[in-house]
Image (cartoon, rainbow, N blue to C red):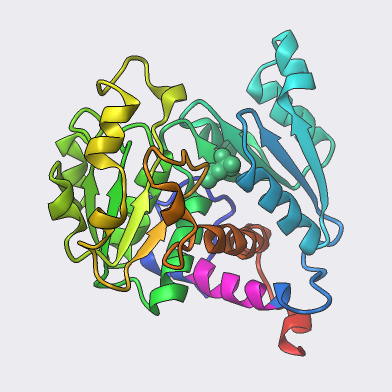
């Protein structure tokens, strides 16, 4: 076990050993989730706050369920009905939550760096649930967990990430996690959305989709982040689908057992043909299932970890 951190704010600063520690812990929690009694007392008496200032379905709900499975008290902060609307700052909001004895604050915010900012002055643990176009650490952790579970390893696999890389926090966190664990990462999409500068993160950039798919073990699709684009980066959605959408013919270029991934939400018929999202090579819903185990592991570890005798005795 090599986890000693108080916060999880990014993947960039984690070592391969720390990432592996989360994955191994999550495997134990996944086993707990398959038992009749799915709850453990690991965070009993702790208060967890879901401070989501941006929309979310998967991340918010799985953090809430993860906290409940660990027996913590969980508060779901609603930005729309909060005093943020009256001009209260993020700093004051977080300090008020801490004054109510919040032990762990999970934050999603449109500003890159918001979790790092909170971690500098809060005594509470801070977990990044997505900050602007910067990072989405637990998405990357559940993605590599799913790859390891499906393929038995991450090292040496060819992983193609296809779509809007420029505005994607999922892409950045995945690139860090995958390269640290020894995967070969290829990025592909319109040149306006996949700048060559990403090669500095240790991956390959190509604008030739056939080349990107040839021999891929994993294809991870990203949606177009309309909410983060300040101007149109390609002529039309139809053109994007024609040039970069995943269909049967293009999937045939990958390895016969290649796996399709997507962090969600999916734009069916845009980045992926609707039937492919539901085909047997798709692990999109497995990613969601694994997100629960990974988020239980993250909350457990930032809380200080320790032994879980209830798991050992099952
Ligand atoms: N993958 C992901 O972050 O989904 P949500 O925005 O629904 O949480």
Q: Residue furthest top?
A: 86
Quadrant of the rendered image holding ligand 1: top right
Place of residue 65 in the rendered image (x, y in percent of width and height, measured from the top left): 75, 55
Quadrant where the C terminus sits is: bottom right
Q: Is residue 55 visible?
A: yes
Q: Residue at 71% of width from left, 40% of height from top? A: 50
Q: Residue furthest bottom?
A: 313
Place of residue 56 in the rendered image (x, y in percent of width and height, measured from the top left): 62, 37
Membership of 162 in magenta stretch? no
Q: Quadrant of residue 306?
A: bottom right
Q: Residue at 64% of width from left, 28% of height from top? A: 53
Q: Nearer the viewer, residue 51 or 34?
A: 34
Membership of 29 in magenta stretch? yes
Q: Main secondary structure of the magenta part?
A: helix
Q: Is residue 18 visible?
A: no
Q: In the image, 185: left or right of 111?
A: left
Q: Nearer the viewer, residue 283 or 60?
A: 283
Q: Quadrant of residue 164?
A: top left
Q: Which residues are magenta?
A: 21-31
Question: Looking at the image, how many numbered discs can be counted on the residues?
Answer: 0
Q: In the image, 250: left or right of 131?
A: left
Rendered position, 126 above or below 120? below
Place of residue 189 in the rendered image (x, y in percent of width and height, measured from the top left): 24, 39
Q: Residue at 48% of width from left, 63% of height from top? A: 283
Rendered position, 293 above or below 114? below
Q: Nearer the viewer, residue 139 or 8?
A: 139
Place of residue 46 in the rendered image (x, y in percent of width and height, measured from the top left): 81, 54
Q: In the image, 190: left or right of 97?
A: left
Q: Residue at 78% of width from left, 38% of height from top? A: 76
């Amino acid at each position: 076990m090599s986890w000693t951190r108080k916060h999880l704010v990014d993947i960039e600063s984690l070592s391969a050993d720390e990432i592996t520690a989360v994955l191994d812990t999550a495997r134990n929690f996944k086993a707990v989730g398959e038992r009749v009694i799915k709850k453990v007392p690991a965070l009993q008496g702790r208060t967890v706050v879901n401070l989501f200032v941006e929309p979310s379905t998967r991340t918010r709900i799985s953090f809430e369920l993860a906290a409940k499975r660990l027996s913590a008290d969980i508060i779901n902060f609603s930005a729309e009905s909060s005093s943020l609307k009256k001009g209260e700052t993020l700093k004051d909001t977080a300090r008020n939550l801490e004054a109510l004895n919040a032990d762990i604050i999970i934050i999603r915010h449109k500003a890159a760096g918001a979790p790092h900012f909170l971690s500098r002055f809060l005594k509470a643990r801070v977990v990044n649930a997505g900050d602007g176009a910067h990072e989405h650490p637990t998405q990357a952790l559940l993605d590599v967990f799913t790859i390891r579970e499906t393929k038995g390893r991450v090292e040496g696999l060819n992983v193609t990430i296809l779509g809007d890389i420029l505005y994607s926090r999922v892409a950045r966190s995945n690139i860090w996690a995958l390269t640290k664990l020894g995967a070969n990462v290829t990025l592909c999409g319109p040149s306006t959305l996949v700048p060559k500068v990403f090669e500095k993160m240790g991956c390959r950039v190509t604008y030739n989709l056939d080349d990107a798919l040839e021999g891929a073990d994993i294809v991870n699709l990203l949606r177009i982040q309309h909410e983060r684009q300040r101007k149109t980066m390609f002529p039309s959605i139809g053109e994007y689908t024609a040039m970069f959408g995943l269909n049967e013919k293009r999937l045939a270029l990958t390895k016969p057992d290649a796996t399709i991934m997507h962090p969600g939400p999916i734009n069916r018929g845009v980045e992926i043909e609707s039937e492919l999202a539901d085909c047997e090579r798709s692990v999109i819903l497995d990613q969601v299932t694994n997100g629960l185990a990974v988020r239980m592991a993250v909350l457990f570890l930032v809380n200080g970890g320790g032994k879980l005798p209830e798991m050992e005795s099952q």
